[in-house]
Amino acid sequence: MLIRKNIKLLVVHCSDTDNRKELTALDIHKMHLKFGWDGIGYHKIICRSGKIENGRPEYWVGAHVQGKNDISLGVCLIGRDHFTDQQYTSLEKVLKTWKATYSNAKIIGHCDTGKTEKTCPNFNVQMWCRDKNL
């Protein structure tokens, strides 16, 4: 179980799927089950339309950052490297909501976690956050 005061990271991911593919949280859940996981690893999914869907409840430890799941929440943008304006608007909404609750948590991209060679989410999250005053 995640403990609110222990949340140190808010991690932005991408699904690393075709940018034109309209996937949902259920699709990601099924994909993660095929990996042998206990279901969807992210706490929020942002669809291509900008719709925000729930993944794991925020009190459940995620499965999205090796070695840091017990101190983080994960949000995943559907796509690989070209996200819609609606997705960015929804991402800002999710992160502002989380920052209101987890004010000491740092917003980072999956690639910034230190334990991966992935480039996910394929944009500079910290620069984007500066532009949005997050």
Image (cartoon, rainbow, N blue to C red):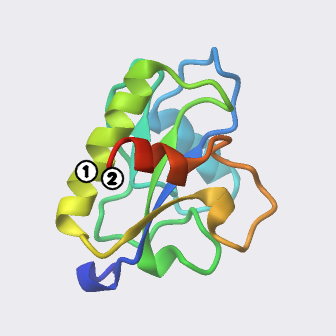
Q: Vertical placement of 13 versus 115: above or below?
A: above
Q: Secondary structure at mark 1?
A: helix
Q: Residue at x 65, y 21 (%)?
A: 19
Q: Earlier in the sequence, mark 1 or mark 2?
A: 1
Query: Which quadrant, please, contains the N terminus?
Result: bottom left
9 lies left or right of 122: left
105 lies left or right of 14: left
Residue that sits furthest to the top in the current view = 20
Tell me if mark 2 has few (under 14), some (14-19) or many (20+) residues whose alpha carbon lies within 10 angstroms of its own. some
Residue that sits furthest to the right in the current view = 117
Residue sitting nearer the eye, 59 or 85? 85
Residue 98: percent from the left, percent from the top?
26, 58
Q: Vertical placement of 5 versus 48: above or below?
A: below
Residue sitting nearer the eye, 128 or 94? 128
Q: Residue at x 33, y 79 (%)?
A: 2
Quarter where residue 10 is shown = bottom left
Tell me if mark 1 has few (under 14), some (14-19) or many (20+) residues whose alpha carbon lies within 10 angstroms of its own. some
Quarter where residue 89 is shown = top left
Residue 111: percent from the left, percent from the top?
68, 58
Q: Is there a contact, CB below 8 Å, between mark 1 and mark 2? A: yes
Q: Residue at x 60, y 68 (%)?
A: 65
Which mark is drawn over residue 96? 1
Q: Label 2 is placed on what type of residue?
A: Leu
Q: Nearer the viewer, mark 1 or mark 2?
A: 2
Q: Residue at x 48, y 21 (%)?
A: 48
Q: Secondary structure at mark 2?
A: loop
62 lies left or right of 37: left
Q: Vertical placement of 118 versus 128: above or below?
A: below
Q: Label 1 is placed on what type of residue?
A: Lys
The residue identified by callout 2 is 134
Residue 131: percent from the left, percent from the top?
41, 42
